[in-house]
Image: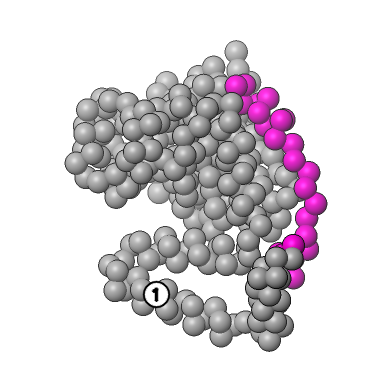
């Protein structure tokens, strides 16, 4: 029998270079979520969001499933709870998180698991991954955004097919539709996610956060208002820069153009962090 402790069912690993892993760890039940797991996941995401040492979050599942949705044996406990309590809502906390969240989809992402995947900033999937919306099959009304987000990503006609038929979408099909950015062999999934996370950590972290925000906020607007929003935030950003920060920018660009090894441009004085990569430990947890 699995250990019911939510601490063991939601694993978190912070790396010294700013990459953090969150693993849904209930493989014998295909990582289905109980109410305590949902609360734990929400709190861990919130904690990572406020941790200044964390720059990127990678979210995945152990075993052969990313997340198979809510544990229906505890459905009443989940669905009749306070669904408006954002503090214990993992999707709400993911949407509030200013830092990039990469979803590493290692298997089934079903219903609530599908919705958690959609709350990530972008997805990398193994060839074995499958996305499936079973809300209509089991008489469950969506409340984590699947009915609205999916159509905005793959189009309303495809979204209606996926949700009304409850048929699975393969990783390859998801990539063709623009739902998934990269499809790789299962053994390469976390390596690919890690590669993308490392690329993000090498950039100006203040701008990474601002860029994610303006993309997300602008997407909610029509193009004219979105362009005005970008212009407004650009002026705000440059007006707030000091002479020293402009000097660092010029030095960074000069270093790139002269093909010297570039130093990382940082506007907030944060120190360089040594690389201490323990991906092998994470891979052992995932049980590939």
User: Relative to 59, is 221 on the left or the right?
Assistant: left
Q: Can residue 146 be seen by looking at this rendering? A: no
Q: Residue at x 40, y 27 (%)?
A: 130
Label total for image: 1
Q: Say above or below: 242 vs 80.
A: below
User: Relative to 48, is 109 on the left or the right?
Assistant: left
Query: Quadrant of the rendered structure where residue 276 is?
Result: top right
Magenta segment: does it hold 239? Answer: no
The quarter of the picture where the N terminus appears is: top right
Callout 1 crowding tier (Cα within 10 Å): few <14, some 14–19, many ≥20: some
Query: Quadrant of the rendered structure where residue 13 is?
Result: top right
The rendered magenta stretch, by its main secondary structure, is classed as loop
Magenta segment: does it hold 282? Answer: yes
Q: Residue at x 78, y 55 (%)?
A: 273
Q: Write down the residue under mark 1.
A: 229
Q: Say above or below: 251 vs 13.
A: below
Q: Say above or below: 18 vs 174.
A: below
Q: Position of residue 154 (x, y in %)?
A: 29, 44
Residue stretch rendered in magenta on the structure: 261-288
In the rendered image, the residue lying farthest to the front is: 258
Q: Position of residue 286 (x, y in %)?
A: 61, 26
Q: Residue at x 31, y 66 (%)?
A: 221
């Amino acid at each position: 029998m699995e250990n019911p402790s939510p601490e063991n069912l939601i694993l978190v690993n912070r790396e010294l270079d700013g990459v953090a892993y969150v693993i849904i760890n209930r493989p014998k039940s295909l990582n289905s979520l109980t109410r305590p797991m949902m609360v734990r996941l929400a709190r861990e995401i919130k904690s990572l969001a406020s941790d200044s040492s964390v720059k990127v979050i990678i979210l995945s599942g152990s075993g052969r499933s990313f997340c198979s949705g809510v544990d229906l044996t505890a459905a009443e406990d989940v669905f009749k709870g306070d669904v408006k309590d954002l503090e214990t809502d993992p999707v709400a906390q993911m949407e509030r998180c200013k830092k990039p969240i990469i979803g590493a989809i290692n298997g089934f992402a079903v219903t609530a698991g599908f919705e958690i995947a959609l709350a990530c900033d972008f997805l990398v999937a193994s060839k074995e991954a499958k996305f499936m919306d079973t809300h209509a099959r089991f008489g469950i009304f969506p409340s984590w955004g699947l009915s609205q987000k999916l159509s905005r990503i793959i189009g309303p006609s495809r979204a209606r097919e996926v949700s009304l038929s409850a048929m699975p979408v393969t990783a390859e099909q998801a990539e063709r539709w623009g739902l998934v950015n990269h499809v790789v062999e299962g053994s390469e999934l976390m390596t690919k996610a890690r590669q993308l996370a490392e690329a993000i950590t090498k950039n100006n972290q203040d701008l990474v956060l601002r860029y994610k925000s303006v993309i997300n906020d602008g997407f909610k607007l029509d193009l004219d208002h979105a362009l005005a929003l970008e212009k407004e935030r650009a002026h705000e950003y440059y007006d707030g820069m000091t002479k020293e920060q402009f000097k660092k920018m010029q030095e960074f660009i000069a270093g790139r153009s002269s093909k010297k090894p570039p130093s990382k441009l940082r506007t907030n004085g944060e120190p360089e962090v040594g690389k201490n990569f323990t991906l092998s430990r994470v891979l052992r947890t995932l049980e590939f």
